[in-house]
Image: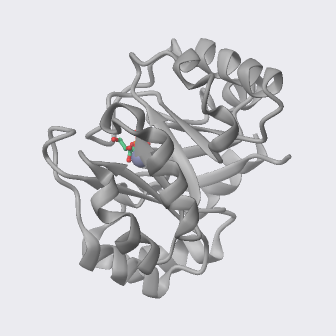
Amino acid sequence: MKKLIAPSVLAADFANLQRDSEMLNKSEADWFHIDIMDGVFVPNISFGMPVLKTIGEHAKKPLDVHLMIVDPDRYIETFADLNAAVLTVHYEACTHLHRSLQKIKSCGMKAGVALNPHTPVHLLSDIIQDIDVVCLMSVNPGFGGQSFIENTYAKVKALKQLIIEKGASTLIEIDGGVTDQNAKALTDAGADVLVAGSFVFKSDNPTETIARLKAL
Ligand code: DX5
Ligand code: ZN
């Protein structure tokens, strides 16, 4: 499978969300990555439902919603109503992960699970077959523009092995510090989806940057 690129709207210009959404529509981006932070699970607050609604009115590609919030079950239906295609919850925020994933799927969305950098992938061995996308955090969640954590390569390889062993069809997504310096090594290790925020939106020509990442 050709890898997917999911630019993170967290790094877009919030005063020009329509313009930046249209740029993504015309680019080779595959998904819109949407970071929802609650100031409790992570030490930052990003944006919430009204802003996501506005993005959704302009986006012509699937919305990949990454919830960095405690007790995400409270909002699963709300994000389905906001047209999320993939809804990702954090392993560390879910006491009953299996139940959360079933609820996400019953609302018509793909179910994602994100792992913080310290959380080992083997903790997913009894649930991997129920997960559509595993999002490996390659920075500590909460902020864009941080440096990539090198241990991520080992986690991608271990996760890929687990997926193969269990006969699952889970996609591997990498989130945080993705650039043209690590994109190819990540896909070579088994990554299917690359999230990139600052590297795309802070570049001189975001459309070209997306095309470059896609081609690597
Ligand atoms: C971090 C977010 C990421 C972030 C990535 O908590 O989950 O999606 O926006 O941004 P960059 O690519 O700048 O690290
Ligand atoms: Zn994210």
The residue drawn where x is 82% and y is 25% is 164
Q: Indicate the quadrant where residue 115 lies.
A: top left
Which of the 4 image quadrants contains residue 122? Answer: top right
Please tell me how many numbered marks the rendered image carries.
0
Percent position (x, y) of residue 193?
A: 65, 45
Query: Looking at this view, is 141 or 216 the one in front?
Result: 141
Say which quarter of the image contains residue 191: top right
| Foreground pick, 122 / 98 | 98
Q: Is residue 136 left or right of residue 212?
A: left
Viewed as shown, does residue 7 lie left or right of 189? left
Which residue is depicted at the point 31% across and 52% down?
Answer: 72
Question: According to the image, what is the colour scheme of the structure?
Answer: one colour
Q: Residue furthest bottom?
A: 57
Q: From the top left corner, tell me how far across and down residue 136 is, in percent.
A: 52, 31
Question: Is residue 205 at least partly visible in the picture?
Answer: no
Up/down of 13 relative to 25, above or below: above
Q: Is residue 61 left or right of residue 10?
A: right
Residue at horizontal 35%, vertical 81%?
53
Q: Is residue 159 above or below residue 93?
A: above
Residue 174 at x, y percent in the picture: 56, 36
Please state the horizontal and vertical placement of residue 98, each as a whole percent of the image. Answer: 50, 42
Q: Using the image as rendered, state which of residue 98 and residue 152 is in the foreground.
A: 98
From this viewpoint, is residue 162 visible?
yes
Is the C terminus in the top left, top right, bottom left or bottom right quadrant? top right
Along the line of sight, the residue nearer the viewer: 77 or 49:
77
Q: Could you tell me which residue is drawn at 78 percent across and 36 percent down?
A: 168
